[in-house]
Each structure stands twice: as C-alpha cells, then as structure tokens.
Amino acid sequence: MRWKVYSDYLRKRFGMSVFRIGVDASFSCPNRTKERMGGCAFCDGTGAVAVYQRSGEGGFHHDAEYNRAVAESKVGYHQDIREQITKGKEFLRRRYGAEAYSIYFQSFSNTYAPVFKLKEVYDEALREGPFKELIISTRPDCLDDEKLSLISSYKEKGLDVEIELGLQSANDDTLRYINRGHDVACYIDAARKVKEYGLFLSTHVILGLPGETDDDFKRTANVVNAYSDAVKIHNLDIAGGTRFQYEYEHGMIRLLTLDEYIQAVELFIARLRPDIIIQRLISETPSHRLIAPRDFPDKSKFIRLLDAKMEADGLMEGSLYEKT
Ligand code: SF4
C-alpha cells in the first residue's frame, strides 16, 4: 500500500494480528443534551456502537458474510461490559481466527464521567483481558489532567494506551455548522495534552463536510500532522434521523461523489506526515441506517481504487507533506 496500514503496524508492534473489541460503556455524550441542541448534525445517536454489539443490526452495508456472522452471534446492546467482551471475543475468534485483542471504548464519549467512575469501568473491562491495547474514544472537551493522569497510569500495566479524538474539520465555521460543540483550538489543546502524557493519539476527520473545499482538507491535514500518530478518515454518510438527513433531502447540502472522495482522500494522505498510521479510509454506516451515499463500494474495493489512483498519480503518504 502507498500509506501506513494499521494492521501492519499492529503485527510489527505485537508480532501478531490484534483485534479490537468495541464496547459501549453507556457514557453518553455531552453534545447530545438539550442545551447543545441535540448533537452533531451527522449523529444518529447510536454512538458508533460496534455492529456485533447490537442485535437487529441486519443489512450491514459492505459485507454480506460479515452481516451473516453478526446475525449468528446473537449479541445484544447495552449489555454488561464483561458480557460484551465475551461476545466480542467469540465473534472475532469465529470470524477472523483472532488470538489477541485490544479493548476499545468505542461508543459515545468515553471520558464523560467523573474520574472514579472512569476507573471503575476501565478496571472492570481490563479484568477480562489480557489485552494489548486500551483504546478510548472521546471528545476534545471531555479530557482534563485528572482523567489523562488516570488513563496514562494504565501504561504501567504493560498496555499500549490510545486516545481517539474527534476533530472532523480544522475549519471553525464548519464545526459551528455541524454543531460540533467545540472549536479547533479545543481539539489542539486536548491533542497537545494527550501527547504530553505520552499517549498514542488517533484523530477522526470527515472529508466532504458541507461547503468544504480542498483548502479545508489541507488545513485539516496540517492540524492532524501536528500531534497525531494515527488518523481515521471518513466520508460524510447521511444517516436516518439526523439533521443532515433533512438538509440532504431538501437539497441544502450535497455529498462528494465517489471520484471526488477518492481524490480528496488521495491528497489528504499525500499531505500527511509520512509516519502517520491510517486506521480508516471510509465510513461504514449499516445499510438500513444509511440514506446516502448508496453507491460507494465496500472497504476492500475502496482501498484498491485508492491505491491504484495514487499509483497512477505517483503519490504516496507524505509526498506532499509540508512541515508547518
Ligand atoms: S460527539 Fe459523537 S456521540 Fe456526540 S453528538 Fe457528536 S457524533 Fe454524536
């Protein structure tokens, strides 16, 4: 591949394939309160729960085999964490032959609670190990020194500890438009702190938010480059029940076409610092919740298309990187 592939990184780091068990610890999200007007405009309130942790999630968008496996796994939603881990392990072992795992606090904002509560929940999950990594996904406005101090203490238990932070865009006007509830400065402050505590940082971005152009994608790449060890890149999916569904169906916003998105990702990757690990390249909203786009390929095909385009254009990750 013409970029740093996450699974390669994991194999090199741990000498084997490592699989994430995504759990929902019911932390919720401060941006979904009434005062904050119901959350990000693209959020359907499912908090990105792992598909295998939700019963009834039929019709997974990109892979019929996977979908069948999910249906067979008979797992539920909002279960006890230990039960989620057991079910996740079973599923990953059966589906991929997994032998090593990371615990991934995936859904909503996983530092949105008092420190004593965070410790209780993280400790409970870690007792179900062994795990290679502790991965905590959260918002930049849900981190402070006390929480980071607790989180970094898990390194002493021999775990790699990763924070996933949502940035989405480095344009404050866009962040306001999508009702993100924090600005770019807030992200930068949190990202800097995460690195001060010696944690691995992954940043989530969306390419194709309303009104954005290549200049915005470039600015977002530059902000990612400043602190991140890894990045998750998403296209804008319109999920049912969101503000963006209304705006899309009323012609107020448009989505990038597949060709436009491939081009945006190609340039974004080329502008990244060459050592940044790419953890995701495309959104994967389950089919029955996805309004648009309906014509994007599955992940494997997207990767093939992107790699071929980058090869044809003579671009690699870092080819256009500019130190700022
Ligand atoms: S931060 Fe995440 S969970 Fe919260 S409103 Fe935005 S997308 Fe939804």
Image (cartoon, rainbow, N blue to C red):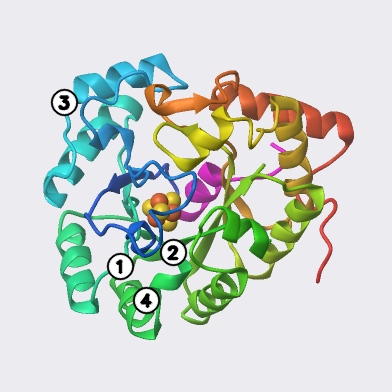
The kind of residue on which mark 3 rests is: Lys
Distance in Å between CA atoms under marks 3 and 4 = 35 Å
Left or right: residue 212 compared with residue 176: right
Q: Amino acid at mark 2?
A: Arg
In the image, the residue with mark 2 has its CB under 8 Å from the nearest atom of ligand 1: yes
Answer yes or no: do the residues labelled 1 and 2 have beta carbons within 8 Å? Answer: yes
Give the numbered dot on residue 139.
2
Q: Are marks 4 and 1 in contact (CB under 8 Å)?
A: no
Q: Identify the magenta region.
A: 1-14
For badge 4, the amino acid type reads Ser
Residue 290 highlighted magenta (yes or no): no
Considering only vertical position in the picture, is 161 above or below 38? below
Between residue 64 and residue 3, name the one nearer to us: 64
Secondary structure beneath dot 1 equals loop
What whole-number distance in Å separates the C-alpha atoms at marks 1 and 2? Answer: 9 Å
Frontmost of labels 1 and 3 is 1
